[in-house]
Image (cartoon, helix red, strand yellow):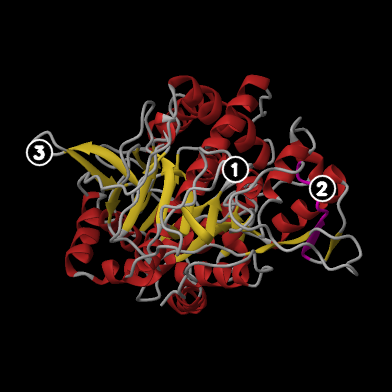
Amino acid sequence: MSDSNSPSGRTASSDPDARSGLDASSGLNGSAARGASTGHRASAGDADPQWAIGDYSFVVAASRLPVDRAEGPDGEVEWRPSPGGLVTALEPVMRDVGGAWIGWPGAAGAPPEPFDADGMHLVGVGLSEQQVRDYYEGFCNATLWPLYHDVIAPPQFHRPWWDAYVAVNRRFAQAAAEQAALGATVWVHDYQLQLVPGMLRERRDDVRIGHFTHVPFPGYEIFAQLPWRRQIVEGLLGADLLGFQRHGDATNFLRACRRTAGLATRGSLVRVPSAALGGEATTVGPRRPPPAADAPTGGREVRAAAFPISIDSAALGEIAKREDVHARAQEIRKALGDPETVLLGVDRLDYTKGILHRLNAYREVLKQGRLGLPETVLVLVASPSRERVEHYRILRDEVEAAVGRINGEHAELGNPPVHYLHQSYPREEMAALYLAADVMLVTSLRDGMNLVAKEYVACRHDETGALVLSEFTGAADELGTAFLVNPHDIEGLKDAIVRAATISPREARRRMRSMRRRVREHDVAHWAQTFLDALKQAPDPGPRAVEPGALP
């Protein structure tokens, strides 16, 4: 995707790191997603003059843009689709619905001018080198990530990191406000932007706001360690609808509302009094009508519920049926020495993925002779991740040492029992790997969903193969006919690996057929449609310029 700046019909923000632009050709369902107040800027008496009413009635705010900057063959700037679960999940939705996507381009410095790519209007939010260190590498990846993943690694709490988190969230909130039309729907994503709903609500009470947390939300005893727990809860409660991967995550958040903010909950609803989220902030656009005189407490009700994310299963399934992909799968098996059983693990190199547990179990299975060599091979794909963060550098060393230990103990000349690939691959190559593998190993210690498990199932159109799946993933709630395991239980994990590798064709078909039905019927479009339908049921924030159309 080439970088093509779109003309802007309004004045950009004076903050060079929060510039925004407009494009007349982008819109919902292929038409212009513009509000009746296109380009309107509130009067000085209504709001901070730097906060505008924008043009798009559907806006997504996520930590990253769905593209990576690259240099073309002639030195020109190109924007190529970036890998990742969120991008994989939202790309087809944004392509069908249109609208604006706000995110960080991925490198320190000023962002590019807003541009259009693959049916999306992309607006970059810039981060300085210091913000990358304090906000991204610090508070997001060294504080929230380990905290939300059951403190598998100890979280770090530093006040400058929190200050950077607040500043960056405010910048994203401003960008969302400047892109959102009057009465727009704004969908904010994940733990990096938990303050954005509250900040946006302060300035734009006319918009309908949803927030989806892709990672687990921890139990209160863990969450309570965070010095800024109340601010996080109040920031999220600026939304009308809060989505989580599992029912347990939503329950954990509701408990945090009661314990941290002293708010009343009823079922999946949180009652937020009018004065609970800050004071009398000046807003852009019409305020929501005040509560009825007979309302018991006034304020708003926010719903917190589970909306398990999924994949574009039809598109991936079509790739897996292609002749060239099947041929590549055969090439992979031949390159591995035509083993009887190919085990596969695909992860970001992250301490939450249980990679060392998987390697330890495989090593013992080989040592005990429960699976033979060279009849059995493990392919371990561990894509690079957060390599500037110390925990990840240590993990890479540990994984590579474990792989070397297994190969040193069990390899024959030309036949290593583990093939370790520390790199990322395009979707076609991943589909070929899924087809080549007889057993998929997903051993996460804690995972919001784990889309790799669903990708493997989507590719197994002949209903062969077996999935070993950690019970600590969101996918375990949906793929109940997988071999569910506790990855901390090495003996149980070993048994599951052996059972999956020696499964009968009849049992494999029964298990895989059930999982494929679930992945096919509950795909990414179903996830997005279900969330957006629920968001539409939130109390009407006021006049709406253009109602976002339903997904096809």
For the image shown, how many numbered marks are present on the structure? Answer: 3
Residue that label 1 marks: 47
Of the two numbered discs 2 and 1 in the rendering, the one whose residue sits closer to the viewer:
1
- Left or right of 71: which side holds 218? right
Q: Position of residue 464 (x, y in %)?
A: 39, 72
Q: Position of residue 142 (x, y in %)?
A: 59, 29
- Res 186 visible: yes
Q: Which of 522 and 76 lies nearest the eye of the viewer?
A: 76
The kind of residue tagged 3 is: Pro
Instruction: Tell me the kind of residue under disc 1.
Output: Ala
In this picture, residue 23 sits left or right of residue 20: left
Is residue 45 rendered to the left or right of residue 310?
right
> In which image quadrant can residue 71 be found?
top left
Distance Cα–Cα, label 2 vs label 3:
56 Å
Quarter of the picture containing the C terminus is bottom left
Label 3: how many Cα within 10 Å (few below 14, some 14–19, many 20+): few
Place of residue 303 in the rendered image (x, y in percent of width and height, measured from the top left): 72, 63
N-terminal of the pair, mark 2 or mark 1, is 1
Distance in Å between CA atoms under marks 2 and 1: 19 Å
Which residue is at a point 67% across and 36% down the rendered structure image?
147
State the mark number for residue 443: none
Q: Farthest residue toward the left?
A: 74
Q: Main secondary structure of the magenta part?
A: loop
Q: Which mark identifies residue 275?
A: 2
Determine whether the residue tagged by mark 3 lies in a helix, strand or loop. Answer: loop
Spot occupied by residue 221 in the image (x, y as percentages of width and height): 82, 41
CA distance separating discs 3 and 1:
46 Å
Residue placed most toward the observer, 352 or 332: 352
Name the amino acid, label 2. Ala
The residue segment tinted magenta is 268-278
Which residue is depicted at the point 28% across and 61% down? 25
Q: Earlier in the sequence, mark 3 or mark 1?
A: 1
